[in-house]
Structure formats: C-alpha cells, structure tokens
C-alpha cells in the first residue's frame, strides 16, 4: 500500500520551532518531488514548500521564506520541513504530497499523485 505519513506537528509558542517529517511506505521517494501544503481553519489549502526529485531544487511560499527549510533524506525515504520563527498565522494542518516529475507549477495541487493525512501545527502562547 502506497502511503505518506506526516509527523512532528504540535503546539508551539510564537518564535518557536518544529520539524515535520513526511515518511513514505510502499514506494521509494527518490523519483518523486515532494510538496508541503497547509490549510488554516476556514481557508483553502495552499503550497508551502517543494523539493524536486533529483537536483533538490527548492521553492517556498513568500510567507515562509527565510523561516522554513525543506530537505530530503532518500536513504530514510523521508522529507523534512524545518520550521523556525513560527508565527500564529502558521497555524494549520500541514500535508505532504508526492508527484512524479512533470512540467507544472510546484504549488499545483492537482499535479500531485499521493497525499498524506496531515499533521496539526498550532502556534499560540
């Protein structure tokens, strides 16, 4: 069974850090690009970050540039999202998704083949 599982979410104070993990089972992430998306209460799900399959090219939403870092460890079949300097507006359910290489915008959700169930991140004092 092909599956993505996110972990690492939780409650953190403003200014704090969290590291999210996206682990794949049933398939190898080596040939897939990975995107992180988030959905805040009452809002649409939007792209947060992306890392390509081979060259490790990364993209970030403007709202997280300089604070979030995406990385991948193919040996562990896992992708990470390091989130620093967290703000209350970062509160959302975070999803990871995998897609085969294709020519489309990294934030185009329809281009992704597999999705995880999400992990809750709450930034509050």
Image (cartoon, rainbow, N blue to C red):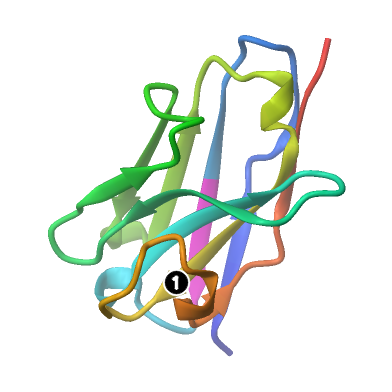
- Residue drawn at x 51%, y 67% as measured from the top left: 97
Q: Which residues are magenta?
A: 21-25
- Residue drawn at x 69%, y 11% as measured from the top left: 14
Q: Nearer the viewer, residue 117 or 62?
A: 62
Image check: 69 left or right of 101? right
Which quarter of the figure is the C terminus placed in? top right
Residue 115, above or below 8: below
Mark 1 Cα-neighbour bin, 10 Å: few <14, some 14–19, many ≥20 = many
Choose top left, top right, bottom left or bottom right for residue 5: bottom right
The image shows residue 86 at horizontal and vertical percentages of: 61, 20
Q: Nearer the viewer, residue 7 or 85?
A: 85
Image check: 41 left or right of 14? right
- Residue drawn at x 32%, y 46% as measured from the top left: 59
Which quarter of the figure is the N terminus placed in? bottom right
The image shows residue 93 at horizontal and vertical percentages of: 73, 48
Q: Is residue 23 magenta?
A: yes
Q: Is residue 22 magenta?
A: yes
Name the residue that disc number 1 marks. Answer: 98
Choose top left, top right, bottom left or bottom right for residue 120: top right
- Residue drawn at x 32%, y 51% as measured from the top left: 72
Q: How many marks?
A: 1
Which secondary structure type mostly characterizes the magenta part of the structure?
A: strand
The image shows residue 13 at horizontal and vertical percentages of: 74, 13
Residue 5, above or below 112: above
Q: Give SS at disc 1.
A: strand
The image shows residue 122 at horizontal and vertical percentages of: 78, 30
Residue 6, above or below 16: below
- Name the outermost residue toward the left: 55
């Amino acid at each position: 069974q092909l599956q993505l599982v996110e972990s690492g979410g939780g409650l953190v104070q403003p200014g704090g850090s969290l590291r999210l993990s996206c682990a794949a089972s049933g398939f190898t992430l080596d040939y897939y690009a990975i995107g992180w998306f988030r959905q805040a209460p009452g809002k649409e799900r939007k792209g947060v970050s992306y890392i390509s399959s081979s060259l490790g090219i990364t993209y970030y939403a403007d709202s997280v540039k300089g604070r979030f870092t995406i990385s991948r460890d193919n040996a562990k079949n896992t992708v990470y999202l390091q989130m620093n300097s967290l703000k209350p507006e970062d509160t959302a359910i975070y999803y990871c998704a995998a897609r085969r290489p294709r020519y489309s915008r990294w934030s185009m959700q329809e281009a992704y083949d597999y999705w995880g169930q999400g992990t809750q991140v709450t930034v509050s004092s």
